Amino acid sequence: MKWGQPLSLTLLVFSTTLAKPGVKNIVLVEGVRTPFLLSGTTYADLMPHDLARAALQGLLHKTSLPKDAVDYIIYGTVIQEVKTSNVAREASLGAGFSDKIPSHTVTMACISSNVAMTTGVGLITAGQCDTIVAGGVEFMSDVPIRHSRKMRKTMLALNRAKTLGQRLSLIGSIRMAHLTPELPAVAEFSTAETMGHSADRLAAAFGVTRLEQDEFALRSHTLAKQAQDAGLLSDVISFKVPGRDTVAKDNGIRPSSMEQLAKLKPAFIKPHGTVTAANSSFLTDGASAVLIMSEEKALAMGYKPKAYLRDFVFVSQDPKDQLLLGPAYGTPKVLARAGLTMDDIDVFEFHEAFAGQIMANLKALDSDWFAQTYMGRKVKVGAPAMEKFNLWGGSLSLGHPFGATGCRLVTTVAHRLLKEGGQYGLVAACAAGGQGHAMVIEAYPQ
């Protein structure tokens, strides 16, 4: 938002701050996202860079940012489209940014756009840049499906063949089994286990019941619907899909009832598993984008920042037994870096991969045994108060485009701090590979 725009907010002046002497203040100026849609719906005929371009154009429109005023553009994504492997560059050119702006793409599973943002923070801190656009995109409606390895080797050899005889010999070597395609799967390469199986085992290890998971999923959808109806999801931009309708809101928000949720059968571990389609995040298409600047540059350009981006950590642990415990490891570490406690945090936004994963992380945070055994801490940090936790819904209901969720989390924290009058917010997320991220965000004084 620009200076001079009307603000219907309580005046906020904080006596303490996480600003550090000699360290640049880095601010979130604005964040936007396309509507997050169930894969195979309205976005089905697009490509990833189409969604990323729409998010970038939405950011430009919302900020009136000159297209040549950006120093660097960074995007996160997980399942890459081969034709646009550096989707950041293709999307930025398509959105009309200057071709003189460097752009690169990063990947770290579900925290890819978190990496995009923190890379931007690093560039600003190092004095390399003042203005960064970061974002993320995922397009699950059309993922790369490969030929089998034997078929690929044969096709590459055909391309190199010099004579007709060599070509005929290679063609004659093809067998029906060679034609079987390789389908992508949301599974760990190191363990060959799907994330749903890991979530089911994690829930069992922490004693998270099916009832608790269904209750949390229902909470997520109910809160998301309330936030959507109240106009609180103001980061969502309208997007005219070529050849189709304009979309203006997420389409996966579906409040149900405990009775309906109870009817669903386990999706991964049958028949006794507790993870179902309803208490898991769904395959989602969507893109996000944020404008990050040094505070000095933002004010010089006439912007009113929304929040400071403060301390952050990345964590990593055993990808078999602790695949989804990133928030449990990251939260205590980032609080320690910032010199804060759980009680200091006014707004929590944790990524909801599965209801069982969220509940397991909350139980781990509230466990002295876990803190002593795995964190090297004498006591637990405690679980977040639920009256502060994911109050506008989460990935279970809003959707989870792998590469785009991080920016949604950070922008939501900034908006909730503004709305609720809090000072500190905390983002945490798990990711494939047994990794995770956590960040402390501080409200900008109003």
Image (tube, grey):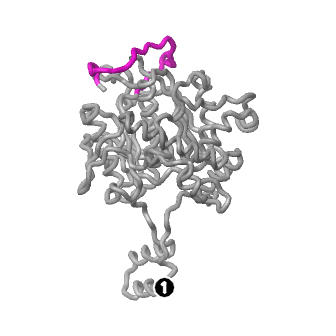
Indicate the amino acid at tag 1: Ser
The vertical placement of 178 against 46, above or below, is below
Q: Given the current orientation, which residue lies at the most extreme top position?
A: 15
Q: Given the current orientation, which residue lies at the most extreme front position?
A: 259
Instruction: Reply yes or no: does residue 289 show up in magenta.
Output: no
Left or right for 184, reference 337:
left
> Is residue 133 visible in this depiction of the protein?
no
Instruction: Reply yes or no: does residue 16 show up in magenta.
Output: yes
Residue 120 in which image quadrant: top left
Q: Which residues are magenta?
A: 2-27
Left or right for 328, reference 310:
right
Position of residue 282 measured from the top left corner of the image (x, y, whole percent):
48, 53
Q: Secondary structure at mark 1?
A: loop
Q: Residue at x 64, y 60 (%)?
A: 269
Position of residue 157 measured from the top left corner of the image (x, y, whole percent):
44, 76
Q: What is the quadrant of the N terminus in the image?
A: top left
**Front position in the image: 165 or 421:** 421
